[in-house]
Amino acid sequence: MNFSHRLLETISYSLPSGKSNDGDLTYSAVSTTKARITRREDIVGEAGGEGVATNIVVETEIELPVDTRVWMPGVSTSNVNDSERVKSREYASTLDGSYTLYLAYM
């Protein structure tokens, strides 16, 4: 079963690519992908076992790692302060493993 028909919006994103000499994250060039965006308040787990408050869930066919910058539809990518940052993520696969849907929490 394929869920790509649910991905009706386009987001822009920039993946963490390393760290600068100052220890700040550096990012890849901006790319786009299809997504489904749901606005809902939630508390989700993170790698350290702590709960983190989120208010946006983005479903995609690609994995968006923690700290990825995401610009919602219609938001200009020219200002990084206008982006959201992935705080937690998870995925779900079909039973036969033929399709995976990734969820990014912001």
Image (cartoon, rainbow, N blue to C red):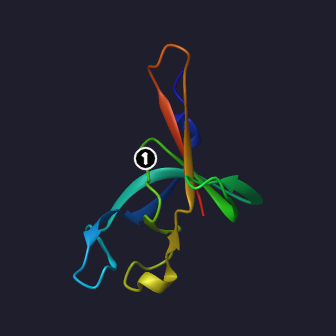
Picture layout, residue 101 above or below residue 13: above
Looking at the image, which residue sits at the far front?
48
Reading the image, the residue beneath label 1 is: 63
Residue at image x 45%, y 65%?
67
- The three-letter amino acid code for the residue at tag 1 is Glu
In x, y percent, where is residue 46?
A: 60, 54
Residue 22 is left or right of residue 36, and the answer is left
In x, y percent, where is residue 30?
A: 31, 68
Which SS class for mark 1? loop
Residue at image x 44%, y 53%?
64
Residue 72 is left or right of residue 31, and the answer is right
Position of the C terminus by quadrant: bottom right
Quarter of the view holding residue 55 = bottom right
In x, y percent, where is residue 80?
A: 42, 82
In x, y percent, where is residue 22?
A: 28, 85
Q: How many marks?
A: 1
Residue 49 is left or right of residue 74, and the answer is right
Quarter of the view holding residue 57 = bottom right
Residue at image x 45%, y 41%?
61
Residue at image x 56%, y 62%?
87
Front residue (pair 11, 64): 64
Residue 42 is left or right of residue 63, and the answer is right
